[in-house]
Amino acid sequence: MAMNVATGAMGSLLPKLVELLKAEYKLKKKVREGVESLEKEMRSMQSALRKVGEVPTDKDNEQVKIWAGEVRELSFNMEDVVDKFLVRVDDGSEPAAKSDKLRRLTKKMAGLFTKGKARHEIADAIEKINKQVQEVASRRERYNVDNIITTPAAVTPIDPRLGALYTEVTELVGIVGKRDQEVMKLLSEGDDMSQKKFRIVSVVGFGGLGKTTLVKTVYDKMKGDFDCKAFVPVGRNAEAKKVLMNILLDVDMKNILHDLGMEESQLTILEEKQLIDLLRKGLENKRYLIVIDDIWDEKLWRVIKYAFSISSNSGSRLITTTRIMSVSKSCCPSTIGTIYPMEPLSNDDSKRLFHTRIFSQENGCPHEFEEVSKDILKKCGGVPLAIITIASLLASDQRVKSVGEWHILLQSIGRGLTDDPSVEEMLRILSFSYYDLPPYLKTCLLYLSIFPEDHEIMKDKLIWMWIAEGFVQCGKTKTSLFEVGETYFNELANRSLIQVVSDGGRAYACRVHDSVLDLICSLSSEENFVTVLNGIDDNTPSESNVRRLSLQKSIKGEDQTACLEYVNMLQVRSIATFQSSIGGMVPFPRFVVLRVLELTGCNFQGYNNLNLRQLGSLIHLRYLGLSGTGIFELPEEFGKLQFLQVLDLSGNDSIEELPSTIIELRKLMCLLVGCEYLTLPDGIGNLASMEQLDMNYGEGDSVSILKELGNMQRLRKLGIRIFSLNLEEQQAFVESLEKLTNISSIEIWISPMSIYYGGLMDLFGECWMAPRCLCEIEIRSENPVFSKIPAWAQIGSLEYPLLLGADGFRCLTVFILIGLLRQIVFQPGALPKAEEVDIQIALQFAKEEAAGNSADWFELAIENLLSLRKVTVAFSRCGVTVGEAKQAEAALKNTLCAHPKRPSFDICFYQNIPE
């Protein structure tokens, strides 16, 4: 593989070095000068590391890799030193309230000697680190690092797409499936008028899905029907001028060049605008088919698109492929473009491809290979590149390997263990997506190797773990860390590197395809980024420090010593367990620099030796995940975790109260309770850094808890389970909500066992004004909680039919309206970003409200929703005939089939059709 170097702890270290220079830390002049020197040198090394991380495989250099590894380890060690100092001189507090000033003053006086000692120790540590930095800097010069990483490649690597461009028809069995017919239909369907219009299809999906093979198949089948044709590969870091030249040469512009008195060799002297003008002139009044394969950059597309006239009525077609959704959207104007998301092969096509490659025929798989074959195909996940690669391993050396060898290979898929040239080639193709990432996204992607294969990774959990690791930085913006982390998550999804799991149009989790996981684990192992202990491929390095530890199997007492025998616990920053029982194996106090501790799902019940009080000694801890662990109380020692940012206690129904010391955690940004009977202590308003809070409120709880919610000015997400709420408590709740100007999501659950009064939350409905940043509000109850519709829930005027115009819901991406009994009409400009619509319509009322009884009485005007991808409509058939119901269904289907985005749709009926 290449020099796939992440920047270590640089992203979080450099801001901390700047922090150290602040006057409040009272460093001596000599120490300040040492820190300034360190910051300058490390920033230079960070720049070099980023360049090293962009070096392709053909320029691999062992000395540079060694140097980069030294810098990475040095950055980790340096951050540990800085953090130890910051922890000892900073108690993590914001300015104290009057009521506890005396207690804090006493605490600070007691810590004066500790702080003095800490300043003396950091002076010694800075001096020592400076010597190490100078040694690494001298090796940088000695190894000629900067020259090596800037020298152009001596040999141009072979384009991995060549195989797809020249695949024989006989080799396409199972690869394309029915997908070529689907793309051809998108390019050719419609009446004579629409056939003449310019049309674009953009195929999008992650590497290895067969995009190039698919569009080449379509191109070969259709090119005979066009006057001009071109198939132009692009790739990463392409220049617009070169792409335009290749299109010109491929569409055979010799006549145009001849008329201009130009030779092909003279094209190189033309500017981009001249090439665009030349192309437009040559393609004018001609019907052309052009494929632009593997576009990586929106900026590139914004240049080359001007070569094509979208107002042309000659029936021209343009096909693009990309791994990046935002590029695909850029290629497809709403009126003429269609995005074709490339899906993995079906089970049948996967099986056909796999068996044909190994046994030369689709049905040639011997009985003893069938089960392991199914398991292997499941891991390949329908990715042709993975299937072909694994098939080549199993049928190498002119023989089919034994069943035992198949099982051995099965165990290694997905963890970066397979060592074979064909696998290296597969990883190289996939690695293009990795190298195209900015440095901060490379780190976030590698972090996914801490999760097991086929694991559903919760979105919020992942982002909070990134934050705790220091991967997420706000820079000079006022955006919250979590919101920045969300952009990281969305960008990885946009680049097809993670598969988003959604519910109701909202992403709540992601998965990593085994092929991508193979790449990530290979890179992670090479960089000593994550150490995995799973009993299969335990990769504990014997010489390097373990920084992040992923425990993926149950470890009993007798195996504890062997499991951690080679782990230097003094350096471990993260521990994540994905097993039902850890047997009390983790000696928490020995992990002195631990920042992330994820124990979700571990069963602590029955392990008396597991002392949660020990967690209080982990003073560097930022993230503590105890969800579903079976714990029944939290010790007061948790109040010592002054730098804790995330505490997840969900799924522990035995916990009834939090320790009073929890209000000392003034850097806490996320508190997930999720325990039905757990109540918050008074003073919760001290947690002014809180951004996400999950809580309970019931009879007997102090109303001050609701009042103090208003102190959490940074709160973005609030989830609250209400068991009782009287008028005074309603008023306190509403007054606090009015102060939460950054709130974007509110979820309220009213217990069916609550003390219920009619109009339980009318005050909330009448008095609260939703802030502009509110994106989501969900209220769940088995009983009505409002006696009338809240003002903030009304959709414009309640006239019928309900008209949705261009003035509202400009940012809405998912529109769900359940229980609507009337007609709804989407006016031009309505819901411009809505991609998913889910509505219920009573046909009887829709018919009554239509003007007259004309044949086209049913009309949604859904064609006005220009971003539409998915439509779900449920018709109520009461009060209309069978013919009228079918008439409405046909009208809607015709509209959706003619929609420029070709959205998927599901139309169903409920209730009986009257005869």
Image (cartoon, grey):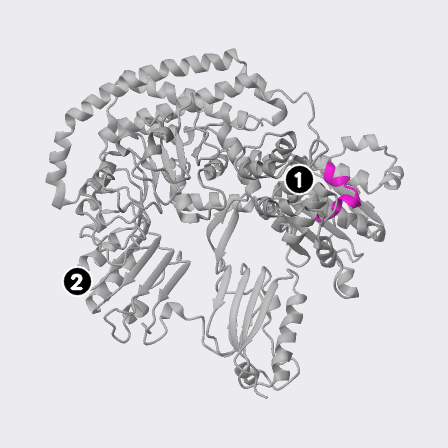
Q: Quadrant of the C terminus?
A: bottom right
Q: Which three-letter amino acid code belongs to the residue tagged 1?
A: Ala
The answer to which of 85 and 586 lies nearer the viewer is 586
Of all residues, the one furthest to the bottom in this rendering is 915
Where does residue 566 sit, x and y in percent of width and height? 38, 25
Where does residue 611 sit, x and y in percent of width and height? 23, 39
Which residue position holds label 2? 700
Quadrant for residue 400, please give it.
top right
Res 20 label: none
Which residue position holds label 1? 391
In the displayed structure image, the side of residue 712 where residue 7 appears, left or right:
right
In the rendered image, the vertical position of residue 842 relative to residue 813, given as above or below: below
Of tags 2 and 1, the one toward the viewer is 1
Quadrant for residue 731, please give it.
bottom left
Q: Is residue 113 magenta?
A: no
Where does residue 585 sit, x and y in percent of width and height? 31, 35
Q: In which quarter of the image is the N terminus?
A: top right
In the displayed structure image, the side of residue 433 where residue 42 appears, left or right:
left
Q: Crowdedness of circle 1 by 10 Å Cα count: few (<14), some, many (20+)? A: many
In the rendered image, the vertical position of residue 283 relative to residue 55, given as above or below: below
In the displayed structure image, the side of residue 175 where residue 562 appears, left or right:
left
Magenta region, residue range: 163-175
Disc 2 to disc 1, C-alpha distance? 65 Å
Q: Can residue 437 be seen in this view?
A: no
